Amino acid sequence: MKIGDIIKISFQNLFRQKLRTLLTIFSIVIGATLISIVYAVIPGFEKFFDMQFNTLNSDRLIEVYPTKDRPGMDILSGLGKAPEEYTDEDQGSFDWEFGSFKDHDIDNMKAIDGVANVYESLFPSVDYVKLEESEQRIKAGFVFYYPNFVLKNLDLVAGDYVNDDDQGKVVIANQFMESFGVDDPDELIGKKIYLHVTQTSLPQAASGMMGFSTSTPQDAEDKYFEFEIVGISEKTILSSVIFVPYQDALEMTKFAKDNDKIMTDEDTDRGYVAVELTDPSLAGQVKADIEELGFMARSYEDNKDVMDDMFGVITIIFSSFGILAMAVSSLGILNTLIMAVYERTREIGVMKAIGATRRSIALLFTIEASLIGFFGGILGIGLGFGISEILNIWGHKTILSTFETLDLSNVSPLLLLGLVISVGVSTIAGIYPALRASRLDPVDALRYE
């Protein structure tokens, strides 16, 4: 028998028992739908978080911390493990002091081959923000200095970036437009903005840790720092961030901490630097050289690998539910085709009597199983993508209205994986009935009632 004839007969045989075939296909649809939803939704989230991740990242950036372990992580590293043996060196430990860079550390990193420059980042503490000619006080959120080569990865909807040697200029997050009651970003370009800073006291041992509360001395001074808005960012999860030049960040930090020793060898809180590479391909070697100096270094690829691994695990976990549903569905296919073999025993005998080979009979039933998986997979992909699209439309009107770049429905080649798995599982399920049919003795089959 020709392959075309076998496919035609298989297609016709499928719908002899329409209800049974449709129910079997529907069982495959459930698994294919789950898999297609996973591969429509998760890539959307992955793309979204990748965009956020790249917002303040660069393949020419290496983050460096003054200790081998990221500050504070050594405290958590022993969770779940048996307590270690006490030694004399542990006396007076449970040390909350973090490392701090010195001037010679910065110079040593600058001297490494492949390093273009080393920048010290600052995060001045700001109470609130006021727009010129307005008394409304808006929470500042986070105020950062980031080197220009990293900041340029942030998409702007208006204006330009802050340069490293600028003063009195800022780039503000897109969401400040809503807070200021402005619809057109160009209206804010050139406007004055005032950042209010109050002197605070912070326990020295905890000065580098997130989550420790600060206190305001009774005689503390406060001050407004004036800036010109030169840029407005695209909408990201960084909804309340203000980017300032280095010198301004330094002055605000000195004032807030009432300390002129900030960013000197007497500063015990120089806990992060950004290393700029001359060439991204040198990241591995430069990272190794920095670690030889006794520091912790993380490259762009290190951070990206963490995110990729996280989404990889999530994808596998949710895909397994769909595959499990298909595995259960395969029992339905097995039952359907075994029943078909019994019902068509005489027909199989006739086919063999007129010259059909065992291979042709086996292929006939195998293709029937594959067609069940194919139709179930196609319907599942369509249904899964449709559900994702509905979630996308609903999400953008409700909980995702802030994040215009997050789409829950994505046309991706990975969606075809649902179809491949559907056909594969169905084909495997059809092997036993196909072999059973091909091994029937034609004489016994013709006598079968």
Image: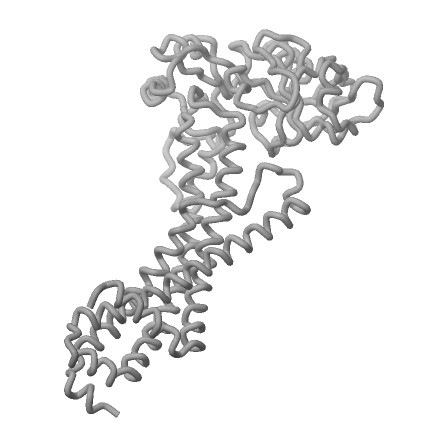
Q: How is the image coloured?
A: one colour
Examine the rendered structure and indicate whether residue 416 appears above or below residue 26. Answer: above
Could you tell me if residue 283 is visible in this image?
yes
Examine the rendered structure and indicate whether residue 342 appears above or below residue 323. Answer: below
Comparing 30 with 247, the one in front is: 30
* Quadrant where the image shows the C terminus: bottom left
Q: Residue at x 40, y 79 (%)?
A: 17
Q: Residue at x 16, y 79 (%)?
A: 354
Comparing 287 with 72, the one in front is: 287
Q: Position of residue 329 (x, y in %)?
A: 39, 69
Q: Position of residue 3 (x, y in %)?
A: 23, 63
Quarter residue 336 falls in: bottom left
Quarter residue 210 falls in: top right
Q: Position of residue 199 (x, y in %)?
A: 71, 19
Could you tell me if residue 269 is visible in this image?
no
* Quadrant where the image shows the N terminus: bottom left
Q: Residue at x 21, y 71 (%)?
A: 362
Quarter residue 291 falls in: top left
Question: How many numbered dots are placed on residues in this image?
Answer: 0
Q: Position of residue 321 (x, y in %)?
A: 43, 59
Comparing 96 with 442, the one in front is: 442
Comparing 2 with 415, the one in front is: 2
Q: Is residue 261 left or right of residue 227?
A: left
Q: Is residue 147 left or right of residue 189?
A: left
